[in-house]
Amino acid sequence: MKYLILFLVLLSSSTYSQNITGKTTSNGLPLPYVNIYLKGAQKGAVSNDDGTFKISNIKSGKYTVIASFTGYQPQRKTITISNADVILNFNLPESELLDEIVVTGTLKPVSRIDSPVPVEIYTPTFFKKNPTPSIFEALQNVNGVRPQLNCGLCNTGDIHINGLEGPYTLVLIDGMPIVSGLSTVYGLSGIPNSLVERIEIVKGPASSLYGSEAVAGLVNVITKKPSNAPLFSADVFSTSWGEYNLDFGGKFKTGKAYALLGVNYFNYNQRIDNNNDGYTDLTLQDRVSIFNKWSFERKSGKAFSLAGRFFYEDRWGGETNWDKSFRGGTDIYGESIYTSRGELFGIYELPTTEDIDFTFSATTHDQNSFYGNTSYNAQQHIVFGQTTWNRVLGKHDLLIGATGRYNYYDDNTPATKNDDKNNPDEIFIPSIFVQNQWKFLPKHELLTGLRYDYDKRHGSIITPRLAYKFAPTKNDAIRLNIGTGFRVVNLFTEDHAALTGSREVIIKEDLDPEQSINFNLNYLMKRYLNSGTFFNIEASAWYTHFSNRINPDYDTNVDQVIYANSNGHSISQGVSLQTDVNFGFGLKALLGASLQEVANIENGNKTRQALTEGFNANWGLSYNIQPANLLIDFTGNLYGPMRLATQEFTNEAGIFIEDPRDKNSPFWSVMNIQLTYKGIKNVELYGGVKNLLDWTPAKNNPFVISRGDDPFEKNIQNPQQDLSFDTTYVFTSLQGIRSFFGVRYNLF
């Protein structure tokens, strides 16, 4: 018996204790953060900063090991595990075929070069060039995307894509819509950066797949697979302004499930008033976010994952002597917002021979806020479910889907009142869509799609889509996209909330859904030079025509914001160019620029949309000094003038009352520099300076907040001549130059 026991112990040891070790490189240099996994074994690892990795406790057998990293060609090797450890090295060349896998454009995994819909990919390496406490702020370095502040004191905002405001941008986590109506700032705050695999951005209407809100485009935050995440990660940094950001992540295994846990905490509690107007330059914040994702092993190998997030934030801005005892009062002005948010989302592949997926998400949002003595309390609950069936028939790749979406919204403003009675907005919107991807010739591909939504408030809404791709070579792609978009009535945005404190919200009529048609031409290429230099170039031109657009009118009455459908139409048009160059000797450059026009045309008059720049550019220069383990990053952006919300008006006596503040913003730029030291195993030390030019909108302006000395308007002498208290004159943060220092740690 003892020999049998000894035999079983030895067998168990030889069956389960083998390891795979190795190193990932590219062009002879260590390549960190590469995903290495055993196909079909639910085991994997991520390479360390020096490129080394280890996968432990592997059963004997034959395996295919795959190493992949965005921007590089994946490598596959077949090995046999017996009774000894295996050393396996991977050298990943830069991707010559632009074969990064994307899912956002067509709801199916496809290489970027093969996607008929242009999709941009941004990895954590990109965002590390300018570390920020939230993805919302990090998007300032993406060409054609701008985080816009809508409130000068509470600093809430939204994401502009190609000049269109936040309500036209849809935000998703792992492909699930978790933000709708409410500003994108909450969906993009508090997601631990260490848990993000990549961010995919689509510019232009995507309503045929995603429905309402996907008019300007969408931002899809894709989190790491739990099995491929670091065992533990930490990223902690602070600034000279007193901001503290703590980001922790880790994974663990329980039974047949891998779990990913992340916690983000951000705190800023300094009352800084550098422009001496008596108000905080930066909103004070106390924010915590907890993220948990589970991936379950199934005998079929099909996917089943479930994730949730809890978010709480307490933020306020106002007069520097404000405290919570003044909340809701009329003595000291402050804007105070308490936000609680919960999210649940997941995917389940049905156990069938057909490729059928069920995806779902649910969000609940509660906001308790005061803008001075004006309360704004709102609750929103959204439940979303979607089933898709994918089938390949010859040269046709067919996708059919059915979607149901329940939305409940209630607040204490005119948006949910009817004859002075509370009337919450409660709606269920069923949808069906079909998409066909047809590769009718080796270099030609056509994608057609059609979506049908039924909204009882507006009836049937149909959104077609057409995309054509021509790939003359393996490194070139020309795409033409024609699509329609729609946005149903929903005024629950941070723009709405920020204005509630200083302007009355007026809804003139029953609003019809906005509709748009978009044309987008895109060219993507990659080239290698004999010197070892390679580069990408992407150029786009777009035109969008809106009808029934819901325009907020700030000008008719300076004490009101009036919402109504336009009697004319609106346009958004422009061109953009972006290049990514790797010089082969440690220098990389990412440069982008856009020219755009967003305007309303009514009764033959064209009015440029407020808070929309006509020109923007961004850059990121990185130089890697390999012998010193030092990386230098210089990032920044440049914005052209935009029309601002001033208070000029003509009073009843016909006298023109002028606002002394600038009517348009100037050209302005924010530049940042960072040094990163990687000479310690599993550790990165980084620091630098943000806003090198110390640019703020307070420069060269007599004031930013109008009537700041009398926020409750107790001492107005002549309403026909005096400016009103208003905090909406804002186009970027008042936060000036500051230094920062941080530490990153990864344990694999």
Image (tube, rainbow, N blue to C red):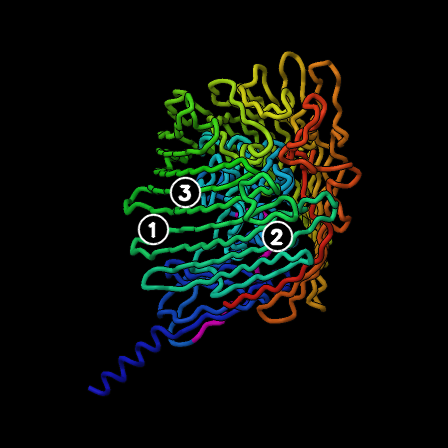
Q: Which residue is mark 3?
A: 363
Q: Which residue is mark 2?
A: 132
Locate residue 290 relative to residue 729 in the image: left or right: left
* Along the viewing direction, whichever of 582 and 594 lies nearer the viewer: 594
* Element type where label 3 sits in the image: strand
Locate residue 90 relative to residue 579 in the image: left or right: left
* Along the viewing direction, whichever of 7 and 672 lies nearer the viewer: 672
Q: Report, in whole angstroms, how far the alpha carbon at label 3 lies from the one at label 1.
A: 26 Å
Q: Which mark is residue 641?
A: none
Q: Residues at badges 3 and 1 in contact (C-beta under 8 Å)?
A: no
Q: Which residue is mark 1?
A: 302
CA neighbours of label 2 inside 10 A, class few (<14), some (14 to 19), many (20+): some
* Along the viewing direction, whichever of 484 and 189 lies nearer the viewer: 189
First in residue order: circle 3 vs circle 2: 2
Write the residue at 75% across / 17% down: 655
In the rendered structure, which segment of residues is drawn in magenta? 85-100
Q: Nearer the viewer, mark 2 or mark 1?
A: 2
Is 699 magenta? The answer is no
* Element type where label 1 sits in the image: loop
Q: Nearer the viewer, mark 3 or mark 1?
A: 3
Write the residue at 34% across / 51% down: 302
